[in-house]
Amino acid sequence: MEEAQQQTFKLVIEYDGSGFHGWQRQKKDRTVQETIEQALAAMTREKVTVIGSGRTDAGVHALGQTAGFKTRSRLDARVFLSGLNSLLPGDVVVRACEQMPDTFHARFDVISKRYRYHILNRPIAPAIGRQFVWHIRKPLDTPAMAEAAGIFLGPHDFKAFEGTGSPRDHSVRTVTDSTIKETGSNLTYDVEADGFLRFMVRNIVGTLVEVGLGKLDTPTVRAILQSKDRSRAGATAPPQGLFLMDVAYE
């Protein structure tokens, strides 16, 4: 019997990160990658490796995470879409499945990613949706935060906003959007770039909140960026407000 040819697929995935220890497979903790791999193994009867566009940390959510996998199964994209969503738990959904050229790589082919961070700025904590926002009681100066956010646009060395424990060849990234928006008590920070360092978005948000509280100003944030000194930037914002919105490819 002739062996089936290998097929390559791309997934677009939505997940509530509250119950996961991040994206990447780990020995003991529940992760998004392993959860999807288990469902694919049940469908294909193969050991399938799912490669994500990048990691998300414990507690971080996604509306548009992408991943790729290869299989010798003859199942098509439509069957994988319906089959995976019937097998996956309620906090993970595959929004799209598409067959791709064999050269496709979910991580190496990325040209940009977009994140959004949600802040609820009011005295009273939320009961509903608290796992999706950073609640800040003290009033924030949104215009000051928006002004400071603008300094991140363009190519910069973001060493001052990189978390420890994930060394890179270089820490230069090009940011194409860095915007604060306010709707009532809700603040969102949108950022798009050709790549992100570990904790980069959360460290930027933590610094912008310091601006909103009057502890830092725009010239100081610019100096922090230029210093490449992580100790000068704000604390890392909590994970639950962060969403990976989408990943762009050529």
Image: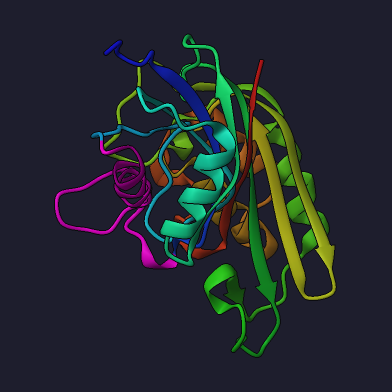
Q: Report the magenta residues as a range.
A: 18-45
Position of residue 121 measured from the top left corner of the image (x, y, whole percent) = 70, 75
Residue farthest along the left direction in this orientation: 27
- Looking at the image, can residue 166 be seen? yes
**Residue 197 at x, y = what percent?**
45, 33
Answer whether residue 164 is magenta in the image: no
Q: Quadrant of residue 156?
A: top right
Vertical placement of residue 36 versus 237, above or below? above
In this rendering, is residue 126 above or below 96?
below
Pick whichever, 114 or 186, lies toward us: 114
Write the residue at 15% across / 56% down.
Answer: 28
Q: Residue at x 82, y 63 (%)?
A: 182
Q: Is residue 202 visible?
A: no
Q: Please give left or right for residue 43 compared with residue 132 in the image.
A: left
- The correct choice, above or below, for 172 with respect to 242 in the image is above
Q: Residue at horizontal 44%, vertical 34%? A: 54
Q: Which of the image's four quarters has the N terminus?
A: top left
Based on the displayed image, in which of its 4 quarters is residue 138 positioned? bottom right
